[in-house]
Every structure is written in C-alpha cells, then in structure tokens.
Image (spheres, rainbow, N blue to C red):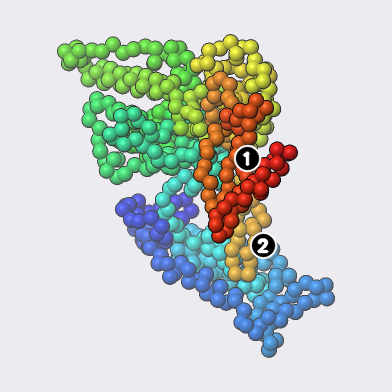
Amino acid sequence: MGKYGTFSSNLIIGRPYNLTYELLDRKPGEKDSYLRIVPASELHADTIAEERAATPSSGADQITIGGDGVEFELVGENGEVIMRSNRETIDDSARQTLTMEEIEELKREGTGAGKDLIAKLMASHLGIEQKTAFSLAKYKLLKTKKYLRRFTILPLDVPMLTRWMMEEKDASKILEMREEMVALIGSWANAHFSESRPFDINPSGGRWLVVDETGGLLVAALAERMGILYPSSSELATENEHHTEIPLATSNTITLIHNNAQPNLSLLKYFSYDPTNSSTSPTHPLSTNLHPLSWLQLLSPSSDPTYATPITPLSPTTLSTLKSGKRGTYYRKLRRHNRITSIVHSTLAGSFSGLAIASHMDPISILRHTIPLLSGGAPIAIFSPTIEPLVLLSDAYSTSRRTAFIQSPPESFASLPPASQSSWAGNEDFPLNPTLVINTSVQSARVREWQVLPGRTHPVMTGRGGAEGYLFTATRVVPAEGRVEARGKFVRKKGGEVAGKGKVEEKREPDGDGEVEEGSPPKKVKLDVDAEGGIESSSNVNMEEAKMEGI
C-alpha cells in the first residue's frame, strides 16, 4: 500500500466491508505487517472529546472585542480564557522544529502505527498553544490522515468510481462527468428494472439505447439502475459448458453503439466484466444483457465483414476430423456471427424505451439515426461537457421550427412515404425532423459540499474546476397522421336539485332555421320552484328566456 507498507491479502479476504484496519509494526524477520481491526469506540473517541471540549458552558458567552470590532477571545465570568481566536495564529513552516529529514526517519521507523510521529509533530510545534480548539482539531486531523497507517475497505459502486476518476485519475476520460450528472442522466432516461415475465408471448421489457464514450461509466450507471451490474457469487462460480452458446436477453437490455471494432468498456473491469478477456464469467448479467453494436453495423450492416460473411455450418462428422484448435476457432466465429446478427436485427427493429448519450460527437448527427429507433414516449438524455452543442440541438427542435415545418414541410420530406418520414435525413433549414421530439430543455447541476460542524457550518470555499457539464432532455413522440380536428360531444345530463330550492335544466336554443344544431353547447335555465307545493313559476322562466334571447 505504498507509504503505509505491505500485508498479506489473505488477512482481508472474506471479511465484511466498512471495517477500519491498522497496520501494525513489522516484527523482526517478518516480510509483511499484520493488521488490527480498529473498534468504533477508538475511531470516534478523539472526535467526541474534541466536540465536548469545544462546547462552551452556559455562562461563558461574553466576548472580548478589540478596538477595531474584531473578536479576540472568548472568556468566562471569572475571566478565564475559554476559547482563543485565530487572529494571532501564524501558520509558518518555521514554527515546526522537526526537519524533513527527522520526519522521514520517524516514518521509516514506523513505531506505533504512526501515532508516535503525530505526537512528536504536535509536541515540537512552537505555536500549538496559540491555536484555538477548532484549529487544533483541524491540525491534528490533517496530520492523522497523513501519517496514521489506517485504511477502510469500502464496496465499489458507481458514485465511488466516479469520484475516484474525477479526483485521483484522469477526469477527461469520463468527459468530466460528476456523480450528480451521472444520476441525472439515469433519472431522465428513466432507466429501471423492467423485465418480461417468462410466460409473456411478446416481450415488453425495457430496452435502452446508449452511446457511451466515458470508458463504460454511463453503461455501468444504467446497468446499476437496471439490476444487471453486480453478479452474484454463484454466477461467478458457474462455469460455462464447452461450446455452449448462451442466448441473448430480449428485455432489460442495453444496446451500446460505439465507434471502433470493440467498445471501450475499460471501467467495467471493476465490476468483474471485461468483454475482451476470455476469463470473464459467461454467466455475468452483462454477458447477455449488454449488446454492443458499431456504427457501421447499424448504418450499413452489409459493409461489415463479420455480419456480411456467413459461417458455413459443418457436419458433426467433419467437426470430429478437425483439430481442437481449428474446431475451437470455428465455434468462436460461429458464436460471434450469430451474436452480431441477432443484435443487428433487434436494433433495427427499434421500439427502444429510452436513449442516453455521453459523447464528443455532434448530438445532431447521433439523433438523426437513433430517433427513429425509439418508441413513442421514450425519454432522451444527452450529456455534453460544454453547452454549445446542446443549444444548437435545442434550436433544431424549437417551437418556431416545428411550426414552420408543419405549415410548409420541405419537398424532400413530403415526397417520402409515411413509413420513411421518420428517417428523413434533414436539410439546411431543418437539420432534424422537429415533429419527432417535444419538451426539450437544457439544464445543469452541481452539488456543493458543506462543512457541518458545531458552530462551524458553512459551504466549502474551494472546489474543483473544469467543465461544468450540461444535460439535454426531451421526449420522443409519434406525429399523428392526417388532419386533426378537435370536437366536443354533448351528453344530456339529468337536472338535479339545487340547494333544495330549485333545479337546473339544460336548454338548447334553435338556430335560424328552427333546428337545434347538433354538438352546440347547451344553455342552462334556472327554474324557480315553490317551496311548499312544488309549482314551477312560469313567469320567471319566461323572463329568463327573454333575457337569453336578447343576449
């Protein structure tokens, strides 16, 4: 573990997560160090003691203020200094009497798992007595994190992997996509577990179309929501029979469109899946629920050599005469051809439940070929590090363009048959068909970290820069064919008693020809009723009719 030392991995295998370990001093003649599980009482003992010491008593609320109005120190009723301010604190490396050579020597000795080094650092600091309780706790915490040989093993999930890539690795490999943006993409794409039941004749489970250039981070985030990211221990232990072809899943799947011959899914190796490694368990959920597809196989399948070159089936007699190496090559090519053929046919059939994109490519060029594959009502979520491509895309689906397109459709679009209009390639004025997508919006989100401590709660004033990151969201719709007319249908209703004094009767007036127009809204006339005999007052009715006819 680098500066902490080495230990045998057998000491942690089979133990639960979230335990904190401490590397003990290496015994003479031993190659590795042993581990000690740190109890929770020891982990939080210093924090609890510091919080109690930092909490002032009820009567110590007097504040001594200097002439310039700045708080100087907190004193009690008897004049005792309870808490100093950090006004006179000077943070300077010269106030630490230990040199770097002495500190490195103490680190090499490694006694007390780093506790002795921390104690000597604090004892040799010249200004330690001038620090406030808060600054002293912060100073001790920084030295503890730096020199104490403790570590905690946590289970890996998508948010932790995102933070690790953003803070420790190269953030540009995941398009600087923060964990809050990863969560927003999955939420707006409506990724969830949706699998067909075994007895369903027509599979109706969810199928999501994905364009991922983040090394597999977006695929991992969607797969985690869909319940197909983490394999069980029994699935990992199961071995596939020789030459057995596992059928692809038809629901609860992710179809990944990529640029190269093989998709870049390097981050999925942290979840026990690697499509380029033959040792990957064939029973992993992503082996059957992740369908990779290149752009060439999507746009021109006949140009792809793997799809266009069928594998000639061999008889069992011929296979028995082949050597084991050639027989294995035959089965591998046959499985690959059948897999690609099945993925291409299912993708071209369309009816996907949603679309999620995180790519450097122009989103307009991507949607030109992926929008026709979505079913009606499918959500669309597109991430971009910069806002300019999403603004152009939002303008292509603006209301003004949609209105102009409906009123005077381009000739190249009107000449197409209705079945091919959704695949229209666009022109200069209308790069995309604006009638296929509605509810477009561009948004951004950034979670700001806060420090939450007694009396010191405030937002953290430092944060990571880089790309802000923006998200385009929309909904796929299916335009209605032909002219749409909205008409109401009148249904006569029974008149009911109104507050025990009268009732409401629906009256429809004739037109100029003396006939009542069908579908015209009724006019309501109130009939007064005598409370005792229930006799209707005809004079009131006639007056009401006269008023209405006058109107």
**Depth check, front residue: 1 or 100:** 1
Would you identify the image quadrant in which residue 456 lies?
bottom right
Q: Are marks 1 and 2 in contact (CB under 8 Å)?
A: no
Q: Is residue 434 left or right of residue 369?
A: right
Would you identify the image quadrant in which residue 350 lies?
top left
**Depth check, front residue: 73 or 370:** 370
Disc 1 crowd rating (10 Å Cα; few below 14, some 14-19, many 20+) is few
Q: Residue at x 46, y 39 (%)?
A: 191
Q: Earlier in the sequence, mark 1 or mark 2?
A: 2
Would you identify the image quadrant in which residue 122 lies?
bottom right
**Depth check, front residue: 387 or 523:** 523
Q: Which mark is residue 532?
A: none
Q: Position of residue 505 (x, y in %)?
A: 57, 44
**Depth check, front residue: 134 or 336:** 336
**Residue 273 seen from this side:** no
Q: Residue at x 23, y 27 (%)?
A: 242
Residue identifier under label 2: 93
Q: Residue at x 52, y 42 (%)?
A: 493
Q: Residue at x 32, y 52 (%)?
A: 13
Amino acid type of the residue that numbered disc 2 sits on in the rendered structure = Ser
Give the residue furthest to the right. Answer: 67
Q: Nearer the viewer, mark 1 or mark 2?
A: 1
Residue identifier under label 1: 523
**What quarter of the picture does the C terminus occupy?**
top right
Label 2 sits on a secondary structure element that is helix
Q: Position of residue 538 (x, y in %)?
A: 63, 47
Q: Position of residue 63 (x, y in %)?
A: 73, 79
Amino acid type of the residue that numbered disc 1 sits on in the rendered structure = Lys
Disc 2 crowd rating (10 Å Cα; few below 14, some 14-19, many 20+) is few
Task: Decide: is 300 above or below 27.
Answer: above
Q: Position of residue 155 (x, y in %)?
A: 41, 50
